[in-house]
């Protein structure tokens, strides 16, 4: 009994002074919020709705994994949104019905993603400028290419491609299984390989990393490539789901992915945090979006407007909450 | 023992180059102007130049706030949303009634100032990185004006208000250009000659040093963001005078454009160095590029790409210079 009391006391203390990795906090908040939501809106835990939420969180989850890698390394990737739009447009412009063509285009899009990430990393390697400016610039550049391809939305995605990418059986769906796979792989890379430790070291103290004989620039390069590769997959998935490409698909994902990462306890300064927090952040945002849609549908409101406001407030609150942590 | 009379410190290139920088920006502007005159001979008139000034005035005014923010080492990504929010509020609330002009304008300015103040509070009191804070504010404001207009802005301007937009001071200058000139002169004076201006530069150059020498960084930063919000609201009202109907895209490009104008005008992203005198030319350069691209009818995509390359190359050049 006393042990449980002490544990509870220690946990409360940690909630008040989040010094290190604070994924615990966000999971607690998530659980409390879930209970609240289930009480207010009982239909939230209907299996169909749960399946829907799990499927809806996949694009954000994938982008947020990449963003976590970049932010842990002390950087930031403001170009994710434009990359998603660009890849969705490339896919929808070039795809035809034949299977070899589809496979080729998928590979092409993923290599485009890798090139985008390599560009970000390369710029940061050659020019000593803050990552914010560099990725903001490349983001606008990619957005410009996307506008050049198509002003708003269009293109053609074969039905087969959509069928494969969005297939689902009850609660299990192809995108969600794929997300779980990527998440586990990313967790393995981050926690059990030398590269993962280098990412933490890069965000914690890049000088020490450089002095211990690791090329800082190449670690940074790889984090940006991971982020962009995941963006290209999300671009393909969004194009398949809506059966067209658009230069606005990615607009919201820049802020959303930063929010999911930061709400999950990853420090903006880098070197602190982890993927489990990001998973919780992603679930939190998808859950709120779903609830918001539900409420908006009831009262005949436009949910996307409120979603912007809530995302902004959520990120400000999270940053305020984590402000004392060094 | 030999007495050291002269320390062998090389003068950094940066110390001398501020003047050269401004000369370079204006030379670049004149060069672009020359190109546009060569391309279209029809535009070689005084009227056309005043048109360019009129087009640049909104961006120029907005960039004054952005410049001061970037000098403190921050960045503001929500100025465009402030412009749109104040714009739809002004038109929606005025709705053709001339009695409401003054109260609606005051309300618009209060909204813009409040948004800037909110940014400042978040950045200083909650220690949120400026770009995250202003990005959040950007989304919140966007949500607010979309909720207010429900996606379809309504309302009409009072005729007297639109006449104000048609007014030409001295028979030449639109009221926007006049506002731009007055604000620029005023804030150049503030930045160069007052203690407040010194503090802005000092915070950008070395925040720790400024704290140690007794500057209250927080108040200065809050004030700078609040001023930027106020100027954005004023810009929005001046721009609204020329509009016939409300538009949700009015402010869309302004955040990016004002950053470009500031950076092209020679203000360092790292903070501490820069000024409004360069930003004036920067704003005109950006507008000139836009109008050239409009003539070629490739404005929607080429503008983004050219601007990003422009910002990138200026920042890259500056960062190289600073590191030598």
Image (cartoon, coloured by chain):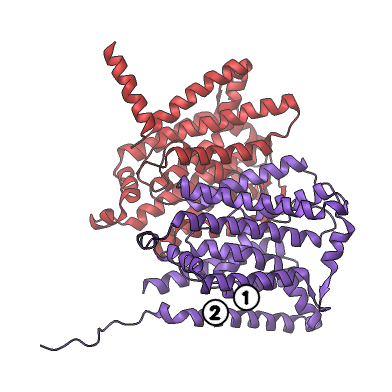
Tell me the quarter of the picture where residue B202 sits: bottom left
Report the side of A197 relative to A142 (left or right).
Answer: left
The x and y percentages for residue A280 are: 47, 31
Mark 2 vs 1: CB contact within 8 A: yes
Q: Which residue is mark 1?
A: B281
Q: Residue B22 — which label? A: 2
Q: Tell me the quarter of the picture where residue A304 sits.
A: top right
Residue at figure coordinates x 36%, y 25% from the top left = A12
Residue furthest to the left:
B1
The residue drawn where x is 48% and y is 64% is B200
Q: Residue B48 location in percent, x, y? A: 79, 78
Q: Look at 46% across and 32% down and name the residue there.
A: A279
Give the class, few, some or many, for how many residues have Cα within 10 Å of label 1's Cα (few <14, many ≥20): many
Instruction: Say if residue B155 shows up in the picture.
Output: yes
Determine whether the residue tagged by mark 1 lies in a helix, strand or loop. Answer: helix
Residue B3 vertical position relative to residue B187 in the rendered view, above or below: below
Q: Which chain is red?
A: A
**Shade of chain B as shown in the rendered figure:** purple
| Quarter the C terminus of chain B occupies | bottom left
């Amino acid at each position: 009994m006393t042990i449980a009391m002490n544990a509870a006391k220690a946990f409360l203390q940690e909630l008040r002074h989040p010094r290190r990795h604070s994924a615990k906090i966000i999971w607690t908040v998530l659980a409390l919020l879930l209970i609240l939501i289930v009480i207010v809106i009982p239909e939230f835990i209907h299996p169909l709705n749960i399946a829907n939420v799990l499927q809806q969180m996949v694009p954000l989850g994938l982008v947020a994994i990449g963003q976590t890698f970049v932010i842990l390394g002390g950087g930031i990737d403001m170009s994710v949104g434009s990359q998603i739009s660009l890849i969705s447009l490339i896919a929808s412009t070039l795809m035809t019905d034949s299977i070899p063509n589809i496979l080729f285009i998928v590979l092409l899009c993923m290599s485009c993603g890798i090139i985008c990430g390599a560009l970000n990393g390369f710029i940061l390697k050659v020019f000593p400028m803050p990552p914010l400016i560099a990725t903001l610039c490349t983001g606008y550049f990619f957005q410009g290419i996307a506008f050049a391809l198509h002003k708003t939305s269009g293109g053609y995605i074969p039905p087969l491609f959509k069928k494969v990418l969005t297939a689902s059986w009850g609660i299990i769906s192809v995108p969600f299984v794929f997300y779980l796979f990527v998440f586990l792989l990313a967790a393995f890379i981050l926690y059990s390989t030398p590269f993962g430790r280098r990412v933490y070291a890069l965000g914690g103290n890049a000088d020490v990393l450089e002095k211990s004989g690791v090329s800082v620039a190449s670690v940074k390069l790889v984090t940006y490539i991971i982020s962009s590769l995941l963006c290209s997959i999300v671009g393909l998935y969004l194009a398949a789901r809506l059966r067209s490409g658009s230069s606005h698909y990615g607009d919201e994902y820049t802020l959303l992915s930063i929010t999911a990462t930061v709400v999950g306890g990853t420090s903006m300064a880098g070197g602190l945090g982890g993927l489990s927090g990001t998973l919780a952040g992603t679930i939190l945002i998808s859950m709120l979006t779903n609830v918001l849609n539900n409420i908006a549908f009831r009262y005949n409101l436009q949910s996307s407007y409120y979603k912007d406001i809530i995302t902004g407030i959520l990120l400000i609150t999270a940053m305020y909450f984590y402000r004392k942590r060094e | 023992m030999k007495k050291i009379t002269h320390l062998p410190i090389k003068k950094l290139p940066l110390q001398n180059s501020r003047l050269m920088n401004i000369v370079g920006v204006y030379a670049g502007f004149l060069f672009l102007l020359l190109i546009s005159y060569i391309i279209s001979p029809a535009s070689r008139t005084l009227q056309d130049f005043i048109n360019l000034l009129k087009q640049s005035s909104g961006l120029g005014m907005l960039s004054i706030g952005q410049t001061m923010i970037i000098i403190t080492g921050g960045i503001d990504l929500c100025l465009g949303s402030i412009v749109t929010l104040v714009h739809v509020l002004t038109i929606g609330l005025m709705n053709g009634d001339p009695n409401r002009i003054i109260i609606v304008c005051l309300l618009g300015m209060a909204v813009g100032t409040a948004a800037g103040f909110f940014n400042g509070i978040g950045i200083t009191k909650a220690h949120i990185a400026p770009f995250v804070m202003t990005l959040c504010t950007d989304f919140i404001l966007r949500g607010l004006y979309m909720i207010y207009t429900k996606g379809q802005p309504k309302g009409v301007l009072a005729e007297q208000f639109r006449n104000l937009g048609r007014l030409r001071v001295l028979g030449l200058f639109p009221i926007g250009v006049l506002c731009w000139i007055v604000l620029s002169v005023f804030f150049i004076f503030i930045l160069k000659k007052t203690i407040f201006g010194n503090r802005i530069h000092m915070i950008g150059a070395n925040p720790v040093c400024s704290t140690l020498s007794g500057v209250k960084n927080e108040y200065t930063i809050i004030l700078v963001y609040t001023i930027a919000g106020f100027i954005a609201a004023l810009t929005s009202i001046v721009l609204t005078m020329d509009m016939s109907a409300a538009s949700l895209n009015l402010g869309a490009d302004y955040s990016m454009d004002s950053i470009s104008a500031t950076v092209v005008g020679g203000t360092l992203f790292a903070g501490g160095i820069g000024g409004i005198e360069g930003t004036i030319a920067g704003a005109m350069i950006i507008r000139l590029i836009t109008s050239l691209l409009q003539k070629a009818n490739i404005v929607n995509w080429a503008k983004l790409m050219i601007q990003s390359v422009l910002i990138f190359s200026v920042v890259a050049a500056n960062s190289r210079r600073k590191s030598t």
